[in-house]
């Protein structure tokens, strides 16, 4: 009887062991499936790694167009000589660039160790601390005008004061009746135009720095009054006239939105620093003719936009645009059947441009006869390149056909920079002048009225001109608003 319980216990242990074995076998099967899945993932990762390695090797051998190749350093600069140490008497602090407005002297009266009185003090060291003065709150000046009774005339006589040179008011009968001073108006115009700050940030700056709390609408109205002030209007007119009288004018246009409608800002600038902006709904060539006037005798530098094709007078087209189109043409047909023809044609055209630039940038400036000879040679060679793919019917499907027709169409406007000294071969000046307007459009989204567009263009013309000439825009605007206006005769 004692063996039966022992037998039962042994059977129970065997059942438990069998269940454990079955459980372990199931875990082994699951682990094997997991290992197979991991092996498959490892295989996919190795294949992806091989593809990326092949792509990396391709980029190393032929980098894409958007990556500039590394320029090897010259051998003479690869191994720099150790810098020679300065003498002890010359190894001081950086030079002082600011004239001190306040001097604080620090002297010892007695020795810190033995307490003996010190004698013969000498200047041993200078240290400057550059700091801004505390922001000043606005000044509010109240002009009290009294009236007095005249017993002889039996009338009240009122005192009068002319504040037209101290405040910016509406034009007309209410001129000089504003409450905002010319300094505040000049500061707001500078922050809005030169620094391109939004109106709400200008309001926040005036509130927290100068304790002046005004509404955004008053800031906008103040900008309108600044732009419509007679001295500002006269200054803008003078900038316009100087652009028209200039020997060289660069022109460009960009999109501008007014009341949600697309228009265009036309920019005309000169190497002397004149900047003139004007808004127009049209992008046609008549706008450029109207802005420059019928008496314009200078040379216009522009891109290849068709609106400039009918412009009378001398014309220089932008080589930067042409060379950029050549580069895109070469990249587009890099692996096509026309690769060699396109590359050879583009190389010949680039060599003509480089030859002309090298001749002008030599140690001695070329004479007038040399300029004319170089111009004739460049134009004839360019015409030959253009006729190669522009006229023949079998070349209408050739990749160079479009640019070849452009060369023949603007043949006289490609090498004017050879004939005229100081004339640039590209239109980078106008491109840089248009950029501030583009940034303003992206920040503000444009203007909401015709008056707003006139204000933005007037301030952009004057502040851009002052900045290009190295003048202080804030001081120049303050000078215009605070001095008596002298109308043109």
Image (cartoon, rainbow, N blue to C red):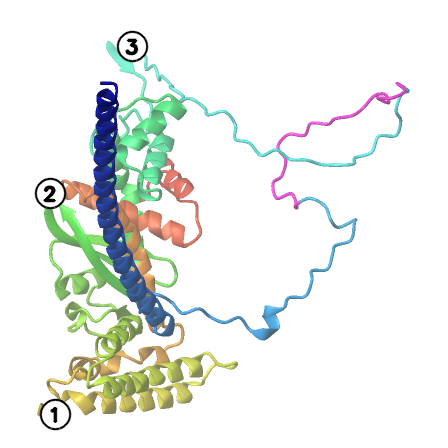
Q: Is residue 113 magenta?
A: yes
Local crowd size for mark 3, using a 10 Å CA cut-off: few (<14), some (14–19), many (≥20):
few
Residues at marks 1 and 2, CA–CA distance in whole angstroms: 49 Å
* Element type where label 1 sits in the image: loop
Q: Earlier in the sequence, mark 2 or mark 3?
A: 3
Question: At which x and y percent is residue 278?
Answer: 21, 53
Question: At which x and y percent is residue 186?
Answer: 35, 36
Question: At which x and y percent is residue 165?
Answer: 35, 32
Residue furthest to the front in view is: 1
Say if 324 sits above or below 215 in the image: below
Looking at the picture, tell me which residue is in the foreground, 288 or 240: 288
Say if 195 sits above or below 302 in the image: above
**In this figure, which residue is indicated by the disc labeled 3?**
150
Q: Which residue does the image show at 78% across and 25% down from the upper left?
A: 107
Q: Which residue does the image show at 39% across and 50% down from the upper left?
A: 467
Looking at the picture, tell me which residue is in the foreground, 333 or 122: 333
Which mark, by number, is residue 392?
Answer: 1
Of the two numbered discs 1 and 3 in the rendering, the one whose residue sits closer to the viewer: 1
Tell whether label 2 touches label 1 (CB within 8 Å): no
Residues at marks 2 and 3, CA–CA distance in whole angstroms: 56 Å
Query: Could you tell me which quadrant the N terminus lies in?
Result: top left
Looking at the picture, tell me which residue is in the foreground, 218 or 400: 400
Q: Earlier in the sequence, mark 1 or mark 2?
A: 2
Local crowd size for mark 1, using a 10 Å CA cut-off: few (<14), some (14–19), many (≥20):
few
Is the magenta region chiefly helix, strand or loop? loop
Q: Earlier in the sequence, mark 1 or mark 3?
A: 3
**Residue bounds of the magenta highlight:** 94-115
Of the two numbered discs 2 and 3 in the rendering, the one whose residue sits closer to the viewer: 2
> Quarter-wise, where is residue 211 in the image?
top left
Which mark, by number, is residue 259?
Answer: 2
* Element type where label 2 sits in the image: loop
């Amino acid at each position: 009887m004692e063996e039966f319980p022992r037998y039962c216990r042994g059977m129970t242990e065997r059942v438990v062991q069998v269940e454990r074995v079955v459980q372990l076998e199931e875990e082994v099967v699951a682990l094997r499936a997991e290992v197979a899945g991991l092996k498959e993932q490892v295989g996919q990762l190795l294949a992806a790694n091989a593809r990326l390695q092949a792509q990396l090797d391709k980029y190393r051998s032929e980098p894409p167009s958007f990556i500039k190749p590394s320029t090897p350093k010259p051998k003479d600069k690869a191994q720099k000589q150790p810098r020679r140490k300065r003498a002890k008497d010359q190894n001081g602090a950086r030079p002082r660039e600011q004239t001190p407005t306040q001097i604080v002297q620090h002297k010892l009266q007695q020795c810190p160790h033995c307490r003996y009185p010190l004698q013969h003090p000498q200047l041993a060291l200078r240290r400057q601390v550059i700091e801004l003065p505390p922001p000043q709150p606005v000044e509010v000046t109240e002009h009290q005008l009294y009236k007095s009774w005249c017993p002889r005339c039996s009338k009240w006589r009122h005192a009068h004061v002319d504040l037209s040179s101290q405040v910016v008011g509406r034009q007309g009968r209410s001129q000089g009746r504003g409450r905002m001073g010319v300094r505040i108006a000049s500061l707001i115009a500078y922050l809005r135009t030169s620094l391109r700050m939004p109106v709400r940030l200008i309001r926040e700056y005036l509130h927290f720095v100068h304790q002046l709390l005004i509404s955004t609408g008053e800031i906008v109205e103040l900008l309108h009054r600044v732009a419509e002030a007679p001295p500002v209007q006269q200054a803008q007119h003078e900038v316009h006239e100087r652009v028209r009288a200039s020997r060289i004018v660069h022109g460009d246009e960009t999109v501008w939105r007014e009341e949600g409608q697309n228009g265009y800002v036309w920019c005309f600038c000169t190497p002397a620093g004149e900047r003139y902006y004007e808004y127009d709904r049209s992008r046609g060539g008549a706008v450029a003719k109207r802005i420059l006037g019928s008496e314009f005798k200078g040379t216009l530098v522009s891109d290849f936009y068709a609106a400039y094709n009918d412009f009378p007078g001398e014309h220089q087209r932008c080589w930067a645009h042409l060379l950029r189109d050549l580069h895109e043409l070469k990249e587009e047909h890099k692996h096509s059947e026309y690769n060699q023809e396109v590359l050879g044609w583009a190389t010949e055209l680039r060599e003509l441009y480089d030859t002309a630039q090298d001749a002008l940038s030599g140690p001695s400036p070329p004479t007038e006869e040399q300029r004319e000879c170089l111009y004739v040679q460049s134009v004839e060679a360019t015409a030959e390149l253009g006729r190669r793919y522009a006229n023949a019917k079998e070349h209408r499907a050739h990749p160079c056909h479009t640019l070849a027709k452009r060369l023949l169409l603007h043949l006289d406007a490609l090498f004017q920079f050879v004939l005229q000294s100081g004339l640039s071969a590209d239109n980078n000046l106008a491109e840089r002048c248009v950029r501030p307007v583009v940034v303003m459009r992206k920040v503000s989204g444009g203007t909401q009225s015709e008056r707003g567009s006139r204000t933005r263009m007037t301030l952009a013309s004057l502040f851009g001109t002052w900045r290009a000439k190295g003048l202080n825009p804030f001081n120049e605007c303050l000078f215009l608003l605070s001095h008596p206006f002298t109308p043109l005769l």
